[in-house]
Every structure is written in structure tokens, then in C-alpha cells.
Amino acid sequence: MALEVEFEKQGNFLFKNRSHIPLIFVFAGFAYIYVYGLNRPVENMYLWIGICTLPILLGQYIRAYAIGFSGNKTSGRNTSAGQVAESINKTGMYSMVRHPLYLGNYFMWLGTLMFVGSWEFVVMCSFGYWFYYERIMYAEEQFLRGKFGKEQYDEWSANTPAIFPKFKNFKSSQYNVFDWKDTLRREYLGLCASFFVMSFYGIFYFSVENQTLTWSEEVKWMFYGNLGFFLIVRLLSKKTKWLQPLRLEA
């Protein structure tokens, strides 16, 4: 099998399972904590939680900006069923970088895994992350080139980096309204997952250290605050129409 075909096949498989395979990194974090402990570089747990939160919020901002100013069924708005894009996003975040959602994902994972407190662990997971998403990006681009033609896609991609933003390329989105309702509905699970993982890392560390199920006040506040946010948005999303998208076009 040619490498081109193999990479695309692997990318499509990873795309459909992209919500499950990263759990490998999560469990690797538990294993690291069990062996080496929680080696945070600062003693103040509130401060360390705040430091780890910064890249998570940066990643969430990138994702929210890309999603909130994108139309439905455009590149980057695909589903677990596969690639469904009917047009190419070329404005907003997509005018600076071809894969802003994956860039945002990286920063969110970065902040979460930083909580373990090992830069070696973060670097190792970063290499694994890029290997994993490289295949997904390749498969997505092959789909877009096949559907929209090499000329149309290559013209845009030639001047738009895959993952490192080219800020001088920025073009305002064709949509004037940021669809914050649709963005919140789509993004709260990923955001809450980041803080739940950090909370569980903290619970696991203190429980192993004290040989009993326990946690610190800082971890407790993070867990319950995140749980409260999750339950409120979940209720609004499932039981009301309050988070219906502002834009209902196809």
C-alpha cells in the first residue's frame, strides 16, 4: 500500500476515534503520578492550577473563535461520521491557519497534562499528539482537495500555514455575529473535560500519598466549580432551547 493511501486510511480511522484515543495520554498521566508523584514546580496549588489553566483557556479561545464565526457544514465542522464539509473556511481564524481546531486542542491538552508537573512528560505527549493529529490533518486535506479541486484548495493552502498561524493573513469572517450559543453548546464538554482530568489527577495524587481517598481544598474547589458549570450548561443544552444556534443556515 502506498504511503499516501496508508496515511489517509490511518487519518480517517483516527478522525472517527479522535475522542477516545487521546485517553491514552490521560492514563499515562495517572501512571506517571503513581510512580513519580505530582511534581508541580510551585508549592501554591491555587497558583499551579491557574498556570495550567492559561493554555487551556488559550486553546478554548482559539477553538471558540474558529467555531463561533464559521457556518454549518464547512471545513472544520465535521462530525464523527466523517468528513461532511460543503465549503472551505477561508476567513476568520481559517485565514491565518488551516487547522485552528487542532491547534486549540493542543493547548487545551498542554494545560491539562502540565498539571502532572513534568516537562519531560509534556514533551513526550506533545510528540505523540502531533504524530496523532498529523494523520488526521492529512486525511482531512486529502478529502478537501478531492471535493473542491486541487486548484481551489491549493490556492488557499499555499499561503495558509497548517498549524502555526500567519497573523498578517487575517481576514474578517463573512459572519458578523459570533454564535456564542452554538459555541457554548458544542464546546463545554471539552472545556469541562480538561478540568475534570486535572481534578482526578489531584485526587489520585493526594489519595496515593495519604493511602486513603482524599483531596486538597484547591482540588475540591476546582472539581465542584467545574461540575456546577457542567451541570448548568448540560441542563440548558438538553432541556431548553436557550442554546439553539443563532445561525440556522445549512
Image (cartoon, rainbow, N blue to C red):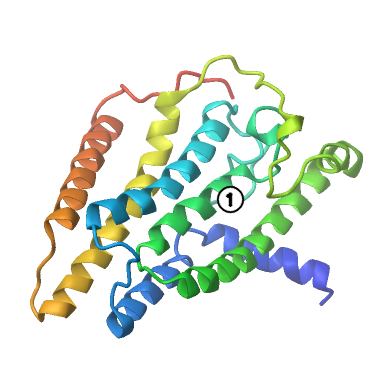
Examine the image and state in which quarter residue 249 appears: top right
Residue 68 in the image: above or below residue 209: above
- At 64% across and 68% down in the image, what residue appears? 131
Position in image of residue 230 (x %, y %): 25, 42
Residue at the outermost right position: 151
Position in image of residue 219 (x %, y %): 19, 57
- At 68% across and 55% down in the image, what residue appears? 137
Taking the image as shown, residue 187 lies to the left or right of residue 72, namely left
Between 44 and 3, the one lying in front of the other is: 44
- At 84% across and 74% down in the image, what residue appears? 2
Rate crowding at label 1 as few (under 14), some (14 to 19) or many (20 or more) other CA atoms within 10 Å.
many
Residue 225 in the image: above or below residue 133: above
- At 31% across and 60% down in the image, what residue appears? 197
What is the quadrant of the N terminus in the image?
bottom right
- Marks counted in the figure total 1
Position in image of residue 113 (x %, y %): 41, 63
Taking the image as shown, residue 169 lies to the left or right of residue 27, namely right
Between 44 and 106, the one lying in front of the other is: 44
Position in image of residue 120 (x %, y %): 49, 75
- Mark 1 belongs to which amino acid? Tyr
Q: Which residue is mark 1?
A: 102
Asked whether the viewer can see residue 221, the reply is yes
Badge 1 element? helix
